[in-house]
Image (cartoon, rainbow, N blue to C red):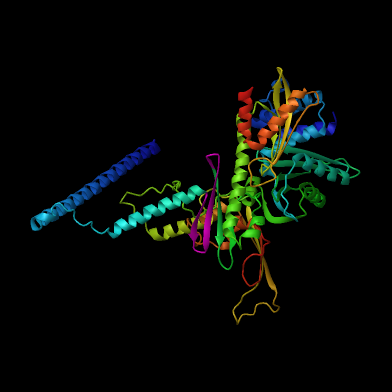
Amino acid sequence: MDETVAEYIRRTVLKIPRDEMKTMLQQWGFLSEAQLQTINFHQKKENVSQDVVQLCEENSADIKQAAVLDMIYNYMYPNKRVWSVYQMKKKGDETEFFDLTNFKKIFKRLLQSALKNVTINFREYEDNAIWIRIAWGTPHTKPNQYKTSYVVYHSQTPYVFISVSVLKSNLPLLCQALLVASSYHDICEMELRSHSLNSLKDIVFKRYSQNFQTYNPRPLQERKVTPQNDLRIIHENRDEKERIQRVTWEAFGDGPQPKLEFAQYKLETMFRSGPKMDVLDKKEPFRCLVKFSSPHLLESLKSLAPVGMADAPLSPLLTCIPQKARNYFKIREKRSLFPESFSSP
Amino acid sequence: GLLAHLEVLEADAREASVKQEEEEKLEALKARAQKLRLQRDQLLAKVSLQQKGHPEDAGATAAPAPPSAQDVLEWKLKSLKSTLQILYLTGISGKLTPRGVCFCISTAYQGTYLDSYYLELLSEPQVRIRRHSIPIFIPLEQISKKYLQTDIRHFLSLLSNHLNAYVGRRYQADQLQEHFSEQIKGTLQRNSLCNLLVFNYDVSARSKTFPFRARLLYRDLCCSLPTEVTISCTPEAPASLVKVAGTHSDLFHRVALHEAFRSFSTAE
C-alpha cells in the first residue's frame, strides 16, 4: 500500500471523534466485521488509527477507497466546512429525466479529460443528494488529497452546494463539468454562504417554515400561551407585547430558523448631511461595511424585538434573508433603498 | 430540593386554575339553563294567553318567529365552514390576503392524504407570485410563465396535477422500498422528481431466482404511471421468463408500483 495512502487514512481516522469511530468504519465497509473486532477502540486515538492503517495494509487499500472514508466523515460533519450556493440556469423547457449513471459518467469524463491527475468519488444518499469529492492535481503532480472540493447536488434542481478548498483556480472547470453533466447552460454564485449545509438547503429549497395564511380545518398547533391566572402578576404593556409577538410571527414564522452565521451589508450610498453641513467636497458614495455575526443569526434577529433590543417590525433588510436566499447585500443609491438582487425563485 | 418544591407548587396552582375554569364553565351553563327556563316560561305564558283570547286558534300553531340575527349569523358561519371544508377536500383552497390571495394545494394518492403546498399571489400591479413552498424541482416558473397572467384556473389545476403526480410517484417508490425491500436487490435508483426509477429485483422460476432489471420512465410529469417501462433479464434466463418480463412490464404500465409487487407475491 502506498505510504501517502497510509498517512491519509491515519489522518482521516484521527479526525473522527472516538464515539463515532466504529460506526464510521462499519459504514465504510472496507474492513470486514472480523477485522473491526480486533481493534480496541478504547486505547489512545493514535493507536487506533495505527491499527486501522495496519488492517488497511492487509487489504491493500488504494486512494479511492480511502477517499470514501473522508466522504463519510464529511457527510456526518458538513458544518466544519463553509458552503456556497451556486445557481444554474437552463435554456429550454424540456423535462429532465436525470439519469444518475449518465451524470456521473459525463462529469468524470469532463474532469479527467481536462486534468489527468484528479481523484473523483461519488456517493448517493436517501434524500436524492449526490455528494462528489474531488481532489485536484496538476499535469505534473498527484492530486492533493488534503485540499479537496466537495459538491452536493440534488437532481433536477438548479442549485449546487460547493465547498471549495483553497485552490479556487479549479472552480471554472468544476462549474463547467457540472453544467454539462446536468444539462444546464449557465451557473453563477449566489450571495449565500454558511457553515450549515442543511440550512442552506432549507433556504433554497424553501423547506423552512413560512407562515402562510390558510383556512386549515386541521387544528393548528397553538403555541402554549399559558394564561396567567395569578392575580399578583400584572402585565404592563400587554398590548404592545402582543403586537410585537404578532409582528415577529409575521416576519419569521413559527418554526426553527435556518442556521446562518453572518449577514453582510455593503453600503455604497451617499452621505446624507444637512443642507448646511457639506462634509464631503466631492459627491462620492460613502463606503461602509456592516456585518452581523452570530452562532445562529436568524434566531437572534427573531428575538431582538421580543426582548426589547429593537423596535418591531425589524428592517426588511434583515427579515428578507431567507426569502431572498442571500446573506450578502450591496446597497446602492437607487430609487428604492432595496438591495440589488437577481431574481431568485 | 428547592426546584422540586417549586414544581410541586406550580402543579398545585395549575390544578387549582383548571378547577376554577371548570367551575366557571359550570356557572356559565347554569346561567344559560336559567335563561332558557325563563324563555320557556315566557313562551308558555304567551301560549296560554292566546288560548284564553282565541280558543278556536288553540289548535293552530303560532306563526314561526322570524329568525333572530344571531341565528342567521350562526347559520351563515356553519354553511361557510362546510363550504371551506369541501373546498379543502377538493385539494385547492384559498384565502384572501391584504394584497392578494394565498392558495393551499393539498395532495393525495389513492386515498392517502400527503403534503400540502402553499402559494401566495399578489394581484397588483399584475398577478405574480410573492412566495411559495413548492419544491424546487417542480417546473413552477415554466407553468407560471405560460398561464399565471392569462388563465389562473388552468395554472392552479396544472400545478395541482404536477404536485399530485409527483407525490403519487414518490409514494409508490417509498412504499416499494418500505414493503418490498427483500425483493429489491441493491438500491432503488431514483431522482428528485421520481420520474426515473431503476431497480433490480428477483423473479423465481423453476425453483431458481433470476435477476430482472426494471427501468421506469415517467415522461408525463402530470401522471403517476410510467410512460416507458424496460425490463431486461440476463441472457441465461429461460424463454418463459421473457414472457414474464412482458407481463410485468404491462403491469407496471397500468398499476401502481407497490400494488404490482403485491400481485407478484400473491401469484407466486
x, y percentage for residue A308?
Answer: 47, 58
Residue depicted at x 49% and y 61%: B97
Magenta span main SS: strand
Q: Nearer the viewer, residue B241 or A36?
A: B241
In what quadrant of the picture does the N terminus of chain A appear?
top right
Q: Most extreme residue toward the bottom, as rendered?
A: A276
Q: Nearer the viewer, residue B22 or B98?
A: B98
Residue A146 visible in the shown view: no
x, y percentage for residue B200?
Answer: 72, 30
The image quadrant that residue A262 belongs to is bottom right
Q: Most extreme residue toward the top, as rendered?
A: B207
Q: Left or right: where does residue B219 sit relative to residue A298?
A: right
Q: Left or right: where does residue A236 sit relative to residue A124?
A: left
In what quadrant of the picture does the C terminus of chain A appear?
bottom right
The image quadrant that residue A34 belongs to is top right
x, y percentage for residue B51?
Answer: 10, 54
Q: How many marks?
A: 0
Q: Left or right: where does residue A215 sit relative to residue B51?
A: right
The image quadrant that residue A344 belongs to is bottom right
Q: Most extreme residue toward the front, as rendered?
A: B56
Q: Nearer the viewer, residue B201 or A209?
A: B201
Residue A5 vs A338, above or below: the answer is above
Q: Left or right: where does residue A106 sit relative to residue B177?
A: right
Q: Most extreme residue toward the left, as rendered?
A: B52
Residue depicted at x 36% and y 49%: A227
Residue B125 visible in the shown view: yes
Q: Which region shows up in magenta?
A: B91-113
Q: Nearer the viewer, residue A193 or A286?
A: A193
